[in-house]
Image (spheres, helix red, strand yellow):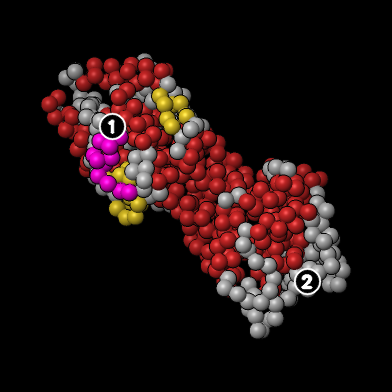
């Protein structure tokens, strides 16, 4: 199995995906272990002094004014974990929790937190054993870190709370640790706080959303090209020289992808045949501009993610010169903003795809296709209600595009008086990505059927490859009405697992 080695300088998005989704093993580098030990010496020296140091010998948040005596400090660290593990609602997905745990380990290994090496090793042991703490949907305000989610993970390190084992069964964490020979940790000064103070949940969800959207944006270029072809549109608007005079890189990439899919099509260029039209509708003609803007938004989000992956987010932090200083680096605003930006872009991409689908089904705008792509319109309803489903999904996407990061609810007796709501932004983006996949699946279903109804005209080789692959996947072609939900589910799976992209790239080579 692939192994990810965690050092002091951060991790990559590929590392996160390998651990969260592929179950990669985690190891600590010698450099990380040395840095952990060195930082711990600094924390222990401060703990031995009479002067109060936040997070080491004081309470937390609005209770930071109290100096805690040495005999109560272990209890203090246990208590912060127990009291902060206050999440509610449904369980969060396994991949999200694994990303959360791994990214907290990344910061711990930076040597900036003051956590002992054995605590970091136990974090790695839980990941390697496939033990996933039960984390709940609600509890993070995205400031002072994803406190409640991270606390549920720290609770499992202590052998408390519930966790899911590698077999998928939820049991007491103490049982799972014992079954895998893992000794629960006894937290010391600063360690409880260090396990909770991070943007790890929202960052993990950002990394995974970017990976999913990378596939979906290329898939959207494919479905847009198929719709253009089915509508007998012109591919002249995709010419590189037209996009070069408005040099947005995402736009150029999207246009190039569509052009590659349409290469060799016998359907394009018929826009002036029976019912001449000078230009295609915006949803067809402007597809690269809309998808391209989303791609450029992703590029910005990826830059933010890369910076955050290289960060050590904790409060207080151990600096290289030995100082332990309080800071505000745990605030989730940078991550929260791009999570919301991506939800906006996803909603717009879904919206333009739905407009193309609707055009395919409307006999007044489809340039010769039967109403609703039905076999016997009137007796058959065709894909009428598939578009209803798609419209419902798009409406939901628009609601999910309302930014979470524009909100803030003060907490901790007004000590934490401005929060990012980044966790909430990440949760709704996951739903948006899920729904966008379904929206593109409906467009794919409609466009492939419409292309097949263009008798006497030859589709592009890439289009033919898509139609053959999607039919082999169980998505049926034109014909009388049938139970539609299984077809839509099969189309969804075809887009979701990358088979749509793979079918095209066997003809075109890699899309951008």
Against 371, residue 427 (above or below) is above
Of mark 1 and mark 2, the one earlier in the sequence is: 1
Indicate yes or no whether the magenta region holds residue 432.
Answer: no
* Front-most of residues 73 and 328: 73
Residue 175 in sight from this viewpoint: yes
Task: Identify residue for label 1.
Answer: 182
Between circles 1 and 2, the one closer to the viewer is 1
Element on which disc 1 rests: loop
Residue drawn 67% across the image and 45% down it: 250
* Front-most of residues 396 and 11: 11
Q: Horizontal placement of 349 versus 204: left or right?
A: right
Residue 330 in sight from this viewpoint: no
- How crowded pointer 1 is (Cα within 10 Å; few <14, some 14-19, many 20+) is rated as some
- Which quadrant of the structure image shows residue 105? top left
Instruction: Name the quadrant of the C terminus.
Output: top right
- How crowded pointer 2 is (Cα within 10 Å; few <14, some 14-19, many 20+) is rated as many
Q: Horizontal placement of 347 versus 10: left or right?
A: right
Residue drawn 55% across the image and 39% down it: 302
Element on which disc 2 rests: loop
- Which quadrant of the structure image shows residue 481? bottom right
Residue drawn 37% across the image and 39% down it: 130
- The disc label shown at residue 309, or none: none
Task: Identify residue for label 2.
Answer: 367
Residue ranking furthest to the bottom: 379
Q: Horizontal placement of 102 versus 56: left or right?
A: right
Against 476, residue 249 (above or below) is above
Residue drawn 16% across the image and 33% down it: 75
Q: Position of residue 507 (x, y in %)?
A: 75, 48
- The stretch in magenta equals 169-180
Q: Position of residue 204 (x, y in %)?
A: 45, 41
Q: Position of residue 80 (x, y in %)?
A: 23, 38
Against 410, residue 440 (above or below) is below
């Amino acid at each position: 199995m692939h192994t990810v080695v965690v050092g002091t300088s951060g991790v990559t998005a590929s590392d996160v995906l390998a651990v969260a989704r592929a179950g990669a093993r985690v190891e600590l580098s010698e450099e990380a272990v040395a840095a952990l030990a060195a930082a711990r010496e600094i924390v222990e020296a401060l703990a031995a002094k009479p002067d109060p140091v936040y997070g080491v010998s004081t309470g937390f948040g609005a209770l930071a004014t109290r100096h805690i005596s040495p005999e109560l400090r272990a209890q203090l660290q246990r208590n912060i974990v127990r009291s902060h593990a206050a999440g509610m609602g449904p369980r969060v997905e396994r991949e999200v929790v694994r990303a959360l745990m791994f990214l907290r380990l990344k910061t711990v290994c930076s040597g900036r937190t003051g956590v002992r090496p054995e605590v970091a090793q136990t974090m790695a042991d839980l990941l390697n054993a496939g033990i996933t703490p039960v984390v709940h949907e609600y509890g993070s305000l995205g400031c002072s870190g994803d406190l409640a989610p991270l606390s549920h993970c720290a609770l499992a390190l202590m052998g408390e709370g519930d966790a899911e084992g590698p077999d998928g069964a939820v049991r007491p964490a103490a049982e799972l640790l014992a079954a895998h020979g893992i000794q629960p940790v006894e937290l010391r000064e600063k360690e409880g706080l260090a396990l909770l103070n991070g943007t790890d949940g929202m960052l993990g969800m950002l990394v995974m959303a970017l990976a999913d959207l990378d596939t979906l944006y290329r898939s959207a270029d494919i479905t847009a090209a198929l719709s253009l072809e089915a509508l007998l549109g012109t591919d002249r608007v995709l010419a590189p020289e037209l996009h070069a005079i408005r040099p947005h890189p995402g736009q150029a990439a999207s246009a190039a992808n569509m052009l590659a899919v349409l290469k060799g099509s016998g359907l394009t260029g018929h826009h002036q045949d029976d019912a001449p039209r000078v230009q295609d509708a915006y949803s067809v003609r402007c597809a690269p501009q809309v998808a391209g803007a989303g791609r450029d938004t992703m590029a910005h989000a990826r830059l933010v993610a890369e910076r955050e992956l290289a960060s050590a987010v904790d409060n207080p932090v151990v600096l290289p010169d030995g100082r332990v200083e309080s800071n505000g680096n745990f605030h989730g605003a940078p991550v929260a903003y791009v999570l919301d930006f991506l939800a906006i872009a996803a909603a717009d991409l879904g919206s333009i795809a739905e407009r193309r689908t609707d055009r395919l089904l409307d006999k007044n705008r489809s340039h010769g296709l039967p109403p609703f792509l039905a076999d016997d319109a009137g007796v058959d309803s065709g894909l009428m209600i598939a578009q209803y489903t798609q419209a419902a999904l798009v409406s939901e996407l628009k609601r999910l595009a309302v930014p979470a990061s524009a909100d803030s609810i003060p907490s901790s007796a007004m000590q934490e008086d401005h929060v990012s709501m980044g966790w909430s932004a990440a949760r709704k983006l996951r739903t948006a990505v899920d729904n966008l996949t379904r929206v593109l699946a409906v467009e794919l279903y409609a466009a492939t059927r419409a292309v097949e109804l263009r008798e006497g005209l030859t589709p592009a080789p890439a289009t033919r490859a898509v139609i053959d692959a999607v039919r082999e996947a169980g998505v049926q072609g034109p014909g009388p009405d049938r139970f539609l939900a299984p077809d839509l589910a099969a189309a969804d799976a075809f887009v979701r697992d990358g088979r749509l992209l793979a079918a095209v790239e066997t003809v075109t080579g890699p899309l951008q």
